Amino acid sequence: MHTEKPKLFRAVFLLVALPFIPFEAGLTQGDRIYFDRISVAQGLAENNVICGMQDRQGFLWFGTLDGLDRFDGYEFRHYRVDLPDVSSPTYNYITTIYEDRAGHLWVGTDAELLQFDRDSESFRRFDLKVISALVEDDSSWLWIGTVASGLFRLKVAEHRLEHFQHDPADPNSLGGNWVSSLCKMEDGTLLVGLFGAGLARFDPVSRQFQHFRHDPADPKSLRSDRVTALCRTNDSQVWVGTVKGLDWLDLTDNKVRHLSDDYVNSLLFQEDADILWVGTRFHGLGKWSRAEPNAGITYYGHQQDDPRSLSSNNITTIFRDRAGIFWVGTRGGGIDKFDPHALRFLHFKHEPNRPSSLVQNKVWSFWEDDEENLWVGTADGVSVLHGQATPGAAFSNYPPNAGPMIPPAAPVRAMCEDEEGRMWFCTIEEGLVKYDKRTRQTTVYKPDAEDPTSLPTNHLYAMRLDRSGQLWIGANGGGLSQVVPKEDGGIECTVYDFDGDGHAPYCWVIAIHESQQEPHTLWLGTWAHGLIKFDTKSRTFRQYKHDPGNPSSLSSNTILSIFEDREHILWVGTLGAGLNKLIETNAPSTQKQVAAKDLVLPENGAETAREQQVSFVHYQVEDGLPSNVICGILQDESGYLWLSTFAGVGRLDPKTGYCVNYGMDEGLQSTEFNVGAAYKRKNGELLFGGINGFN
């Protein structure tokens, strides 16, 4: 058995050799993006990240206003000004980073051009000022854009440096000397973005520049001459970012199409998904699909109260590593990253300023009724979702024109719907509540000392409507109750206890599961009384308990959750002792077996007993589980078991025992989940409730 706990940076360096997963399996237009933030608090040199890239060794490099950072997925290595060391950068303002085909790392600063020596971790200096852009062409020329000195190309091995700059007397020269961006085309030409002089295309054969400029009289020209970013496809199409918006240029006919009015800082085209990512100065990260050109740009911005949103709306750089993870540099917010393939959990919670949000954040139970409405039991009543669980979905606390379904401030620990369409709620303190959806009438049932057929206690924790229509309730100090509705609207309870004396206070039944294979059989999880197999027809039970001398016995006597998988294997979640898989054999075994008794509920105190061939396989934290407190167990359509715990959610492969664990990085409401708050909807969605809403 193995575990994999996704961490904030883990996939960065360790997954670079994995096969690439197509982006289409992840985000689609309009989906929520969950960003992980990396700032000076995690070791970044400075929160203004100007540029970034991944080298061939898997390292990530980031240029900031306070030096160059190398990130290995765990730690940052800083390169800053160090006056006694002549090999250190003389200026900490890093403007651009580029790796050439030979593996040389080039660093542009506000003072000079640097070449990084990996062996000595030192820098070689080139006296070129205010570097703004770098790119290598097919002839191994390194092209160097500067802010005020035009364009250079360099061949270090041949000691050759050529200079291209604006000549007012030559219309075929570079249009301006402030180079903002460079882009090498498939045909060998070079696109040069100029801040103040539009776009230039350099032909290495003629050594001349073709110009694309803004013309106020021509709506098909560039939106602005102040070009800030360039990005191309493999079919001669180019995106041009400017201070006044984004343009789409087709070099086959030189036609320009305007896409947005945003100030564009950076661009990244994702060829495999036909998606353009747009880093803007004011509106965060934009996403535009070339397959749907008229759909517009979807923006993802900073939200003050959302720590999983962008850290800043001023995006300076975007790149994707070889594992498919996106890295977004910002002004003032450090680095934001997101993994489009990562599993993400939708999160629903109470929002004080939104009346249609969940009524309370502590979620204890779920039920989907025959109309596919989702009922959510909380520590302060019930919320109902009419429709699909989508981001921003609206909940109603009460049906229209009706009173409250349950008494106010009542924690709802379990619920179900009977064959007549009535909802039943197990609550703490307020007893059993029946709500008739057709008449919108509510009935509350509580213990009555004068009525031996009333509820044994107000502390109700579990509920099950079996296939025969019988309603069973588990209680704290109330054992198991069979509840039969009467014609006069009342109920009649028969209480079954499992601690041997048949007298109150009875044991605490926390979980109830009806066997899918054995008729008339309930499995009961109890506090301190182990696992109980109860025959509802013969009224007999078998009790399985922890035996310190038997490693194949139940691992704990406190059972929080019970689940039967599609192979009819029973899984038992415990408090502090992990997960148990029940193995039942009909023939004698050489392994030690759990000593079990077949007890007839006593009418006269008599008990009969026989041995049962049963053993348990244990899964715990040391085997890869996120926690040994198993609050809920579900199975998805692929056969994986999902475990909600006190330390996140785990996905267990029942065939191999391999467990993948998920935490708040994947959008969990918290790492702490509640007992009993696990439910599978008819459409296959898995729901897990915790202390901060539900996923």
Image (tube, rainbow, N blue to C red):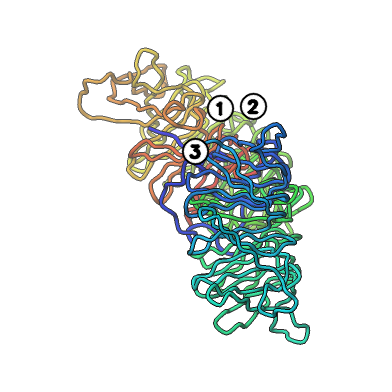
* Side of 313 relative to 423 (left or right): right
Q: Which quarter shows the N terminus?
A: top left
**Dot 1: what SS?**
loop
The percent position of residue 224, horizontal first and vertical second, equals: 75, 74
Earlier residue among tags 1 and 3:
1
- The disc, 3 or 2, on the residue closer to the chain's N-terminal end is 2
Residue at the top extreme? 549
For label 2, the crowd category at 10 Å Cα-Cα, with few meaning under 14, some 14 to 19 and many 20 or more, is few
Residue 425 shows in this picture: no
Of the residues under marks 2 and 1, which one precedes in the sequence? 2
Residue neighbourhood size for the residue with mark 3, other residues' Cα within 10 Å, grouped as few (<14), some (14–19), many (≥20) = many
Residue positioned 32% across, 19% down in the render = 609
- Is residue 323 placed above or below 169 in the rendered structure? above
- As drawn, the residue found furthest toward the front would be 159
The reply to whether callout 3 and callout 2 are in contact (CB within 8 Å) is no
Up-down relation of residue 555 to residue 351 (above or below): above
- Counting the numbered discs, the total is 3
Could you tell me if the residues under marks 2 and 1 are in contact, i.e. CB atoms within 8 Å?
A: no
Residue 307, quarter of the rendered image: top right
Q: Could one spot residue 2 in this view of the protein?
A: yes
| Residue to which mark 3 is pinned | 661
Give the Cα separation between the discs numbered 2 and 1.
14 Å
- Residues 560 and 308: in front is 308
Report x, y in % for residue 688.
Answer: 56, 43
Report how far apart the C-alphas of labels 3 and 2 lie in the structure. 48 Å
Which residue in the protein does label 1 denote? Answer: 478
- Judged by depth in the image, the label closer to the viewer, 2 or 1, is 1
- Dot 2 amino acid type: Ala
Give percent across and percent down for residue 199: 67, 73
| Residue with the mark numbered 2 | 449
Image-based side of 591 in relation to 606, left or right: left
